[in-house]
Image (cartoon, rainbow, N blue to C red):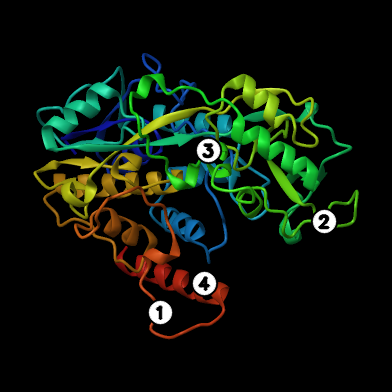
């Protein structure tokens, strides 16, 4: 094809869009601001950088995340290809070695003869040509402001990431390996807590000092529920954590032979198992406070913190008012948007919209009708939600079974019902492809 299509941002969505366009025979100009400039959450020069290991969620087809991943495989996803090459054990979830994952995608993109890499920050909308914006939830301030001026207000919320500790620094006499209800391999390190240990930890957590949000300049930050800082969650009630990330159900402490009062789980951060992520411990506490409070968790008394948790701002657009279902801008059809900037939440969701934006940018260039996925598919339902003008007070949305239309017949058992819904979605995707 003679027309070169510009993709801005080399995160998951941008890499998926560029990869799909190349596979369809288009030349691509992929613009990435790293390493000249970094967002608050990113450190690596590689493309498709992740901030936690278990980023791709459940694998089983009868789950929202598993279904979305299957649809992505059907669409030729480079994310799924990389994940399969760099996966680490995580029970029923698809977790990856973050470094190897990003390296794999970076090499694939850089070695693609149809893709030209252009480094440097893009601060405004290119005046001609087809463009896909995949700038992510941490779109630079100047570009976000120029986009706002051009097509209307963007919105923002706050996101947080969890700390990582060294495996060598754990007290293996206190922790134990296991998964809830013995599902999958014993891929999680469990830190069981007695009632008095939990009570002391809770009191320390809710009174710990939080880091100021200097760069965000807002008095009332919105926090996305799926990445709620643990200290904010704890402030909702004494037992909130015990029914959330510290729930002990499905676990038996081999040291006592009974279920713990509360339980903290750690998950492998890399394939070697040298680093562990504190599951559900996204936080905005000061680094010294994280060390003090999280070291109260049994087994973490002498933990070495390889990365402390941080909190950062995410930015997204008012997609129900601005985007068509092919992910193009209503007021300027040559401009497409993908990734978390559109208001989808999650790595797989972000990557999936990148594939769809790439397909539709190619079809626009060829003068073809856009690909509008049926609502029976997870990706189609997700895009339908973020472009539904009836949605008020728009907030980010991740893949979930509630987005899909119900079955025409009732199935009482939830697992069987979800599997039937997923099989229907796969059939719908096969039909349209």
Q: In the rendering, which numbered label is found on residue 252?
A: 2
Question: Which part of the image, by quadrant, shows the C terminus?
Answer: bottom left
The reply to whether the C-beta atoms of the residues labelled 2 and 1 are less than 8 Å apart is no
SS at badge 2: loop
State the residue at coordinates (79%, 52%): 260
- Nearer the observer: mark 3 or 2; the answer is 3
Mark before the other along the chain sequence, 2 or 4: 2
Q: In this figure, which residue is indicated by the disc labeled 1? A: 407
Q: In the rendering, which numbered label is found on residue 108?
A: none
SS at badge 3: loop
**Most foreground residue, 358 or 416:** 416
- Nearer the observer: mark 2 or 1; the answer is 2
The reply to whether the C-beta atoms of the residues labelled 4 and 3 are less than 8 Å apart is no
Residue 321 location (% of width, % of height) = 17, 50
- Nearer the observer: mark 1 or 4; the answer is 1
Q: Quadrant of residue 111?
A: top left
Residue 68 location (% of width, % of height) = 44, 57
- In the rendered image, the vertical position of residue 357 relative to residue 406, given as above or below: above
Q: Residues within 10 Å of mark 1 (few under 14, many from 20)?
A: few
The reply to whether the C-beta atoms of the residues labelled 3 and 2 are less than 8 Å apart is no
- Nearer the observer: mark 4 or 3; the answer is 3
Q: CA distance from mark 2 to mark 4?
A: 29 Å
Q: In the rendering, which numbered label is found on residue 419?
A: 4
Q: In this figure, which residue is indicated by the disc labeled 3? A: 229
410 left or right of 186 in image: left
State the residue at coordinates (74%, 60%): 250
**Most foreground residue, 243 or 184:** 243
Residue 186 location (% of width, % of height) = 77, 50
């Amino acid at each position: 094809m003679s027309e070169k299509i510009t993709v801005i941002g080399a995160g998951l969505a941008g890499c998926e869009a560029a990869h799909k366009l190349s596979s369809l025979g288009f030349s691509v100009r992929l613009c990435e601001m790293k390493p000249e400039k970094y967002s608050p959450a990113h450190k690596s020069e590689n493309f498709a950088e992740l901030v936690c290991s278990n980023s791709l969620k459940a694998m089983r087809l009868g789950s929202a995340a598993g279904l979305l991943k299957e649809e992505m495989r059907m669409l030729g996803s480079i994310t799924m290809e990389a994940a399969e090459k760099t996966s680490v054990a995580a029970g029923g979830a698809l977790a990856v070695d973050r470094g190897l994952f990003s390296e794999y995608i970076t090499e694939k993109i850089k070695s693609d003869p149809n893709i030209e890499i252009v480094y440097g920050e893009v601060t405004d909308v290119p005046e001609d040509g087809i463009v896909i914006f995949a700038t992510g939830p941490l779109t630079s301030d100047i570009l976000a402001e120029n986009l706002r001026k051009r097509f209307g207000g963007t919105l923002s919320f706050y996101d947080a990431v969890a700390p990582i500790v060294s495996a060598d620094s754990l007290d293996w006499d206190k922790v134990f390996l296991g998964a809830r209800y013995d599902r999958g391999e014993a891929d999680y390190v469990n830190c069981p807590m007695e009632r008095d240990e939990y009570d002391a930890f809770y009191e320390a957590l809710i009174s710990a000092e939080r880091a100021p949000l200097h760069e965000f300049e807002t008095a009332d930050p919105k926090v996305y529920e799926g990445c709620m800082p643990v200290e904010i969650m704890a402030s909702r009630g004494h037992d909130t954590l015990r029914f959330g990330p510290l729930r002990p159900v499905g676990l038996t402490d081999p040291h006592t032979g009974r279920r713990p009062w509360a339980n903290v789980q750690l998950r492998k951060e890399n394939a070697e198992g040298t680093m562990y992520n504190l599951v559900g411990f996204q936080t905005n506490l000061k680094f010294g406070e994280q060390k003090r409070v999280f070291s109260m968790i049994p087994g973490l008394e002498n933990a070495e913190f390889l990365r402390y948790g941080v909190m950062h701002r995410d930015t997204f657009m008012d997609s129900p008012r601005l985007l068509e279902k092919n992910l193009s801008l209503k007021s300027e059809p040559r401009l497409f948007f993908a990734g978390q900037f559109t208001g989808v939440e999650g790595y797989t969701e972000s990557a999936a919209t990148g594939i769809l934006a790439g397909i539709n940018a190619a079809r626009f260039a060829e003068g073809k009708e856009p690909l509008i996925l049926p609502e029976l598919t997870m990706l189609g339902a997700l895009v339908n939600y973020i472009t539904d003008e009836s949605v008020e007070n728009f907030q980010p949305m991740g893949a979930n079974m509630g987005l899909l239309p119900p079955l025409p017949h009732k199935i009482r058992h939830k697992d069987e019902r979800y599997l039937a819904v997923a099989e229907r979605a796969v059939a719908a995707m096969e039909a349209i492809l």
